[in-house]
Image (cartoon, grey):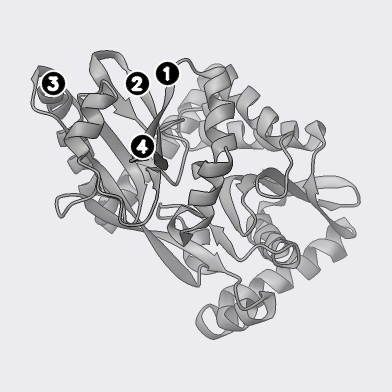
Amino acid sequence: MSRWRALQESDAAFDNPFLSPEFTITVGELRDLVRVAVLYDGQDIAGFFPFERHPMGIGKPVAAGLTDAQGLIHAKDLDVDPAKLLKSCGLSVYEFDHLVSGQPLLDERHERHPSPIIDLRDGYGRYTASLREHSGKTYKSTLAKGRKLQREAGTLRHDYATTDLAPLRTLLGWKTDQYRRTGRTDRFSHQWIVELVERLLATQSESFAGVLDMIYVDDEPVAGHFGLRTRTTLAGWFPAYDTRFAKYSPGLIHHLAMAERAAESGIQVIDMGRGQKEYKDKLKNGELEVAEGRVARVGPAAGVHWMMRVPVRKTRATVMANPFLLKTADKALKTYGRLRTVLQG
């Protein structure tokens, strides 16, 4: 683990908790699919490649579908032949959707996407100054709604980096309601994901920890977030709020409070993850880059995988890139979510 950590901390591109050894180890305790390839340069360990091996030799990132940073953790300028790596790992294909920059697996065929961040390297004050300059209306209205929330509901309190399970379960309940309301698949219907989050909350060290924080009014929970951190990067993961307070924009109120406390604790970057969300556009003051695609060896399994996955991915990318199509798809999902809620009720 010490060598993994040293490699991770040697390159800013790897400064994400989803690339930390603790994350892979914890997922591996719950998922038999998890593997780690150790790469050598002579006698020296030069890299680690965490992955999941699925049937037919299909490789995916650890906790595929949940993570916003994926890839090898490796020494600078390490020469890696992707085909040889896949063969050594018993893989026909490795597919990814959040591969971090600078990876030896990347080439010009792979699609690049922005991953918005809250950059706190110059401090919270400088961050809010940039918000006032570029998103002044959002910043001022969020502060005003925070004051209104306190006038109408009670004193605002922020509990940052708590390890209490009770607020975590409240947060996951809100998130489940959000998934159902918007027509998305409820991730927390899978027990292993619930247990993963609980175990990560209990993991607390200087270099890696689960971070749960909530805001309250008169001790009633309003909004919160569960994510993971390294020493200097907090990865956004599961934000949610109580819809009874929706008119106050509790998610934005919470994110500003979280950014302030995170900066005080030494966090320099909050990585909000790839994806077009209105709150990300309003809060970001920078971007990273992640890639989507696959690497494959020639063979039947790779061909079957291409037919099953690549056309679907390209169609999805077309929808995401077109505002009209995206709005239409989102509306359809929300309609489905409302119907599902009525039928289940």
Specify which label sits upstream in the sequence, 1 or 4. Answer: 1
Q: CB atoms at circles 3 and 4 under 8 Å apart?
A: no
Is 11 placed above or below 145 here? above
Residues at marks 2 and 3, CA–CA distance in whole angstroms: 16 Å
Query: Where residue 16 appears, x then y in whole percent?
Result: 52, 51
Residue in the picture at 42% in, 66% down: 287
Specify which label sits upstream in the sequence, 2 or 3. Answer: 2
Q: Is residue 240 visible?
A: no
Is 29 placed above or below 253 here? above
For the residues carrying marks 1 and 4, which lies nearer the camera in this image? 4
Specify which label sits upstream in the sequence, 3 or 4. Answer: 4
Residue type, mark 1 in image = Leu
Mark 3: which secondary structure? helix
**Residue that mark 2 sits on:** 53
Q: Is residue 316 visible?
A: yes
**Residue that mark 1 sits on:** 33
Residue type, mark 4 in image = Leu
Specify which label sits upstream in the sequence, 3 or 1. Answer: 1
